[in-house]
Image (tube, rainbow, N blue to C red):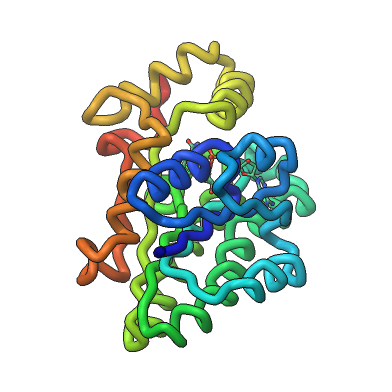
């Protein structure tokens, strides 16, 4: 049975990925910091309460791996919403660490398992912030942009061993995390939550927010043999962003 490991897989996009991979017949392993969310995952998933930036704890999870077909390095936080002059270095470091170092650590420990098997797929969850930038979200955009550099490099490094590496850039995805983002942005922009929401939807060609399932479907495809010649790619699942900073 093929196996997927998803970091931050107990809720939100990661949880939807787990459901997608389970439906595709893979055994699902998830890591997450949130023990309660892990406990609420399906009984046949293996869950590990681990912070994605904790190297010894991440190494301990991978030490139990006799096989790994797909890694979804998905852990990330939105970080502060503030003009750059108001961003505390501590908040910058935490945001960059969870998004970028979290992906690095997961890939670092997945690589030897996949290289030994001569096959594997790694999917990094970046963001449209990593394509366009994101006003008032400097650490997040910088980290998500850097994840694309990490992905391109890993694709070159691991491709000769049969391992593909790609990045998904979700647009605005509905869910608990987005509600926090909308509230913080409404405060910074002097708008209501609904105005910010409508602005982001209007800023896409599809005039719509993305659902977690949309990201999961792309991850399942990238992890499958149907994508066997797809590597080193950045794939936006965002309803086509026309205006990354809508002011409406
Ligand atoms: P979320 O805030 O819903 O969190 C999902 C899970 O991450 C939670 O279960 C949480 O406990 C876990 N988590 C948080 N910090 C962690 C850490 N240090 N180690 C391990 N687990 C941790 O997030 P989401 O909206 O599902 O986002 C998932 C990924 O998608 C992130 O990398 C995020 O940056 C990216 N993304 C999200 C959106 C969006 O609109 N939601 C858009 C673009 C990119």
Q: Is residue 156 shown left or right of residue 113?
A: left
Percent position of residue 40, x then y: 64, 34
Residue 179 image offset from top left, x and y in percent? 57, 23
Is residue 145 in sight in this rendering? no
Q: Nearer the viewer, residue 111 or 24?
A: 24
Quarter in which the C terminus is drawn: top left
Looking at the picture, does residue 221 appear above or below residue 148? above
Q: Quadrant of residue 244?
A: top left
**Residue 84 sits above or below residue 183 on the image:** below
Q: In what quadrant of the picture does the N terminus appear?
A: bottom left
For residue 48, side relative to residue 233 (left or right): right
Q: Is residue 175 visible?
A: yes
Q: Residue at x 50, y 63 (%)?
A: 146
Seen from the viewer's position, the closer of residues 132 and 35 is: 35
Please give the name of the residue rendered at 52% of the width and 53% of the height, measured from the top-left corner.
74
Query: Where is 220 relative to 237, above or below?
Result: below
Q: Residue at x 74, y 48 (%)?
A: 91
Residue 205 on image: x %, y %: 22, 30
Q: Position of residue 177 (x, y in %)?
A: 58, 31
52 vs 172, nearest the viewer: 52
Residue drawn at x 49%, y 74% is: 67
The count of marks equals 0
Split into quadrants, the picture shows ligand 1 in the one at top right
Q: Nearer the viewer, residue 246 or 73?
A: 73
Res. 148 image quadrant: bottom left
Figure quadrant of residue 230: bottom left
């Amino acid at each position: 049975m093929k196996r997927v490991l998803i970091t931050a897989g107990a809720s939100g996009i990661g949880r939807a990925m787990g459901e997608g991979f389970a439906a595709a017949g893979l055994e699902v392993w998830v890591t997450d910091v949130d023990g309660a969310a892990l406990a609420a995952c399906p009984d046949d998933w293996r869950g590990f309460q681990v912070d994605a930036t904790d190297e010894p704890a991440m190494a301990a999870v991978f030490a139990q791996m006799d096989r790994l077909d797909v890694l979804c390095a998905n852990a990330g936080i939105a970080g502060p919403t503030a003009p750059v002059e108001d961003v505390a270095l501590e908040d910058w470091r935490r945001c960059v660490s969870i998004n970028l170092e979290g992906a690095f650590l997961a890939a670092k420990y997945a690589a030897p398992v996949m290289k030994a098997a001569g096959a594997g797929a790694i999917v990094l969850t970046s963001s449209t912030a990593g394509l366009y930038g994101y006003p008032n979200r400097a650490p997040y955009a910088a980290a998500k942009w850097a994840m694309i550099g990490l992905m391109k490099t890993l694709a070159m490094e691991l491709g000769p061993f049969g391992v593909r590496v790609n990045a998904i850039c979700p647009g605005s995805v509905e869910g608990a995390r987005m509600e926090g983002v909308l509230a913080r942005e409404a405060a910074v922009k002097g708008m209501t939550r609904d105005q910010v929401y409508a602005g982001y939807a209007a800023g896409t060609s599809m005039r719509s927010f993305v659902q977690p399932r949309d990201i999961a479907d792309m991850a399942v495809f990238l992890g499958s043999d149907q994508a066997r010649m797809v590597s080193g790619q950045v794939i936006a699942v965002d309803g086509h962003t026309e205006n990354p900073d809508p002011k409406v």
